[in-house]
Image (cartoon, rainbow, N blue to C red):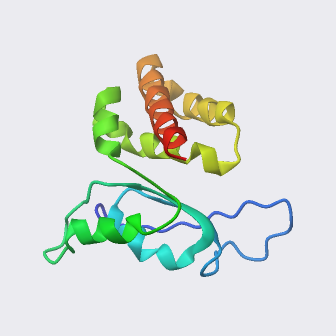
Amino acid sequence: SQRGGDVQSNLRLSDRPIASDLIPLGKCDLIISLEPMEALRYLPYLGADGWLVTNETPFVNIPNYPDIDKVMEEINKLPHTIVLDVDKVAKETGSARVANIVLLGATVPFLGIDYEKIQDGIREIFGRKGESIVETNLKALAAGKEIAEKRI
C-alpha cells in the first residue's frame, strides 16, 4: 500500500466454519473507515443492519476529490452510522497520532470483543514504548467508545 492510498481488509468472525475470508456484497456487519470517501467506496458490502463507523475529515489527496458535503450527505442517508472527527478527538486526548485508536474505540460497541481485552491488546502492543504512550492510546480508545455509545 501507499501512504494516502486505498487499503482494504476483510475480517470475518464466526462460531461456525468460515469458507472464505472475503465478505460478500451486502453481508458486512461493520465498515470502519479513516476517510469518508473511502467509506462510500465500500458501502455495497454493508448489510441492511450493518454499521458504518468513519472519520468525518477527508484526506484530499486527488485533484478531483468529490464535494465533501455530498459525500457526507450519502453517508448520512444510512440508518446506522457513527461519524466522528477522529483527528480532533485524537488531538484532544494528547496526540494526533492516535486517530486510528479513537476510531477503534468507536467500533467497540459492534465488535463483540470484551473492552478489557482490547485494552490489554493496547497495553501489549504499546507497552515497550512507555507508560505515557500506553495511557494516551487507552485515553483515545475510551474517547472513541464514549462517542459511539452516545450515538447508538
Residue sitting nearer the eye, 72 or 123: 72
Left or right of 67 on screen, residue 39: right
* Residue 88 drawn at (x, y percent): 28, 39
Q: Residue furthest top?
A: 131
Q: Quadrant of residue 69?
A: bottom left
On screen, residue 101 above or below 41: above
Residue sitting nearer the eye, 44 or 79: 79
Left or right of 123 on screen, residue 90: left
Left or right of 100 on screen, residue 120: right
Residue positioned 38% across, 38% down in the render: 98
* Residue 70 drawn at (x, y percent): 26, 72
Asked if one can make out residue 5 in the rendered structure from this viewpoint, the answer is no
* Residue 106 drawn at (x, y percent): 50, 44
Asked if one can make out residue 23 in the rendered structure from this viewpoint, the answer is yes
Residue positioned 57% across, 28% down in the render: 123
Number of numbered callouts drawn: 0
* Residue 78 drawn at (x, y percent): 47, 67
Specify the quadrant that holds the N terminus. bottom left
Left or right of 3 on screen, residue 12: right
Residue positioned 43% across, 40% down in the render: 102
On screen, residue 100 above or below 124: below
Residue sitting nearer the eye, 105 or 129: 105
Q: Quadrant of residue 11?
A: bottom right
Q: Quadrant of residue 97?
A: top left
Residue positioned 67% across, 30% down in the render: 116
Q: Residue furthest right?
A: 16
